[in-house]
Image (tube, helix red, strand yellow):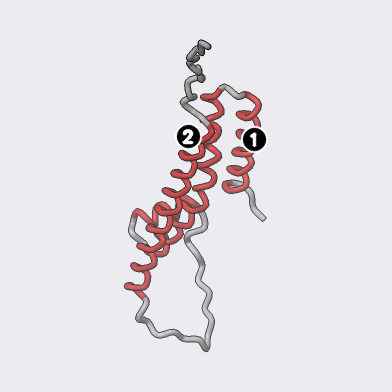
Amino acid sequence: MITEAREVVRPAPSRWSDTKVDQWIGRLLQAGVLAAAAVVLAGAVALLARSGGAPADFRHFHPERSTLDGLAPIVRGALRLDSAAVVQLGLVLLIATPVARVALTVVVFVLKRDRLYVAITLLVLCLLLYGLLWGRA
C-alpha cells in the first residue's frame, strides 16, 4: 500500500485579518483610555495642589461661569497648563477614543476594499462627529 504525502496548501494570511484588526482596535482603545486617564490624573493632581487646601464654604453657593465651553478653549487652557482645562482635555480624549476606533475601522475597510462597510462606517463616523461637534441638546 502506497500512501502519498500531500501538502496542504493554505492561502496566505491577509495583512488585515480579523484577528489582526481586533488587536489593532484593542491597542487603540487601551492607548486612548490610558492616555485619557493619565491626563485627567495629572490635571486633578495639579487642581488639588493649587486649591485643594482652601476651606470649603457650604453655606453659600456661588456658581462659576465656565470658560471651557468648547474644544478650542479647552485646548488653549490646557496649553496654558490650567489644571481644570487639563482635566477637561483628558475627558475629551476619553470621548474621542471610540470615535478614533470608528475612524480606524473606516481605514481598514478601505484597505480591504469593502465598499459597503466603508459606506456604513463613514455614515456612523459622520453621525458621531456631527453629534459631538455640532449637536446641542
Report the residue at 58% width, 48% height from top.
132
Q: Which residue is mark 1?
A: 123
Question: Helix, strand or loop at disc 1?
Answer: helix
What residue type is disc 2 on? Lys
Question: Residue 96 appears at what percent x and percent y?
Answer: 50, 48
Report the residue at 49% width, 41% height from top.
25
Residue 36 image-quadrant placement: bottom left
Which sits in the foreground, 28 or 136?
28
- Circles 1 and 2, Cβ within 8 Å, touching? The answer is no
Residue 105 image-quadrant placement: top right
Q: Which residue is mark 2?
A: 20
Question: Gap between marks 1 and 2, in whole Å?
Answer: 24 Å
Please rate how many residues cluster around mark 1, counting C-alpha atoms within 10 Å: few if below 14, some from 14 to 19, many from 20: few
**Which is more N-terminal, label 2 or label 1?**
2
Report the residue at 50% width, 18% height from top.
8
Judge left or right: residue 28 versus residue 120.
Answer: left
Question: Residue 72 appears at what percent x and percent y?
Answer: 46, 50
Question: Residue 63 appears at what percent x and percent y?
Answer: 53, 74
Report the residue at 51% width, 10% height from top.
2
Q: Name the residue furthest front.
A: 1
Rendered view: 6 above or below 68: above
Identify the image quadrant of the C terminus: bottom right
Which sits in the foreground, 43 or 27?
27
Rendered view: 41 above or below 51: above
Which sits in the foreground, 52 or 37?
37
What residue type is disc 1 on? Leu
Judge left or right: residue 108 versus residue 27.
Answer: right
Q: Name the residue furthest bottom.
A: 59
Question: Residue 80 appears at what percent x and percent y?
Answer: 33, 57
Question: Helix, strand or loop at disc 2?
Answer: helix
In front: label 1 or label 2? 2
